[in-house]
Image: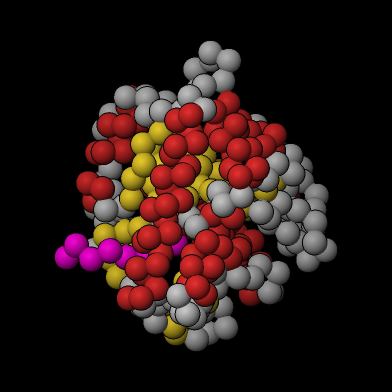
Amino acid sequence: MRIAARRRPLVLKFGGELLEDRALLAGVVSAVARMAIGDGDVHAPLVIIHGGGREIDAALKHAGLEKRQVDGLRITDGATLEVVVAVLGAVNTRLVAALNTAGVPAVGLTGADANCGLSELAAPHRAADGRAVDLGRVGVPAKDADMRLLESLVGDRFVPVVACIGIGRDGTLLNVNADTLAAHLAARLSAKRLVIAGTTPGVLGRDGATLPLLESAAFAELVSSGTATAGMIAKLRACEHALAGGVDDVVIVDGRDAAALVAAAESDTPPRATRLIADCDTNARLKVGSARTLA
């Protein structure tokens, strides 16, 4: 692997809600430019994954198609998939153009490029309420997805920008949850950190305050207690996968705050965000609903 001899990459996942508004997109781009270019210092290589949820929802409504989701995962039939692919392609091009204009050497991709997003058809999803739900044309990243293209781009100091579209072994395009794809790529690329940026200021406890530090042992309790719902359930499951795959930590941050976004990428104690780790000293375990940091 080319990455093994270089600095471990930083993987950034951006929710589509950050990329549809011109002002929010400008903030994201300025933060990424600082991470990629900085003040001449040596920075970790970057890999970006993005979604496009709100624009997909709007396009579905315009097409007269129903939006269906379970635990933050989109149920995808053939007609929905066509909309997803079209919207994500437009979002990807817009983001790549903005990054390159800001001096970031970004390259737009989907998971179909060089099979970097090779995926298996998802099994029926066991929902938080116990139901088994057929997700339709939704993919789960395969363990043997080919990382050589991403490794080559990163090794040559380009910034891959990957839309969350997977490809089946038969060439069929599949909708892949962006958090799931980001966690998979972070693990496969031996990333040091995964940053998940949306419009939520981290993981919230029962009191509505951001939990500054959270260990993986608490994830299941957050879901079972109902504290984590909808899209946060998918994020926590993705975080668990990334941590199990060797990523040092995951930071969930409100990407509307450019300064917080940069801190989420660079700081060991990012403010206004939640840092998630694989485990910690049981005597200092963070209790769900508490907003205190671990001792």
Count the marks: how many? 0
Question: Height in image: 239 above or below 62?
Answer: above
Q: Which residue is at 52% across, 75% downward?
A: 61
Q: Which residue is at 35% across, 68% downward?
A: 82
Magenta stretch contains residue 185: no
Left/right placement of residue 271 relative to residue 241 reads: right
Residue 222, can we see it? yes
Mainly helix, strand or loop, the magenta region?
A: loop
Q: Position of residue 36 (x, y in %)?
A: 50, 26
Left/right placement of residue 167 relative to residue 13 reads: left
Q: Position of residue 83 (x, y in %)?
A: 40, 67
Magenta stretch contains residue 174: yes
Quadrant into which the C terminus falls: top right
Question: Height in image: 107 above or below 188?
Answer: above
Front residue (pair 18, 69): 18
Q: Which residue is at 60% across, 31% downward?
A: 30
Residue 49, can we see it? no
Question: Height in image: 217 above or below 146?
Answer: below
Left/right placement of residue 220 relative to residue 269 reads: left
Q: Position of residue 214 (x, y in %)?
A: 66, 52
Q: From which residue to which does the magenta span run?
A: 169-177
Q: Residue furthest top?
A: 40
Q: Residue furthest front?
A: 62
Quadrant into which the N terminus falls: top left
Front residue (pair 78, 3): 78
Q: Which residue is at 70% across, 41% downward?
A: 257
Q: Residue furthest right?
A: 207
Figure coloring? secondary structure
Q: Residue furthest left?
A: 170
Q: Position of residue 107 (x, y in %)?
A: 36, 36
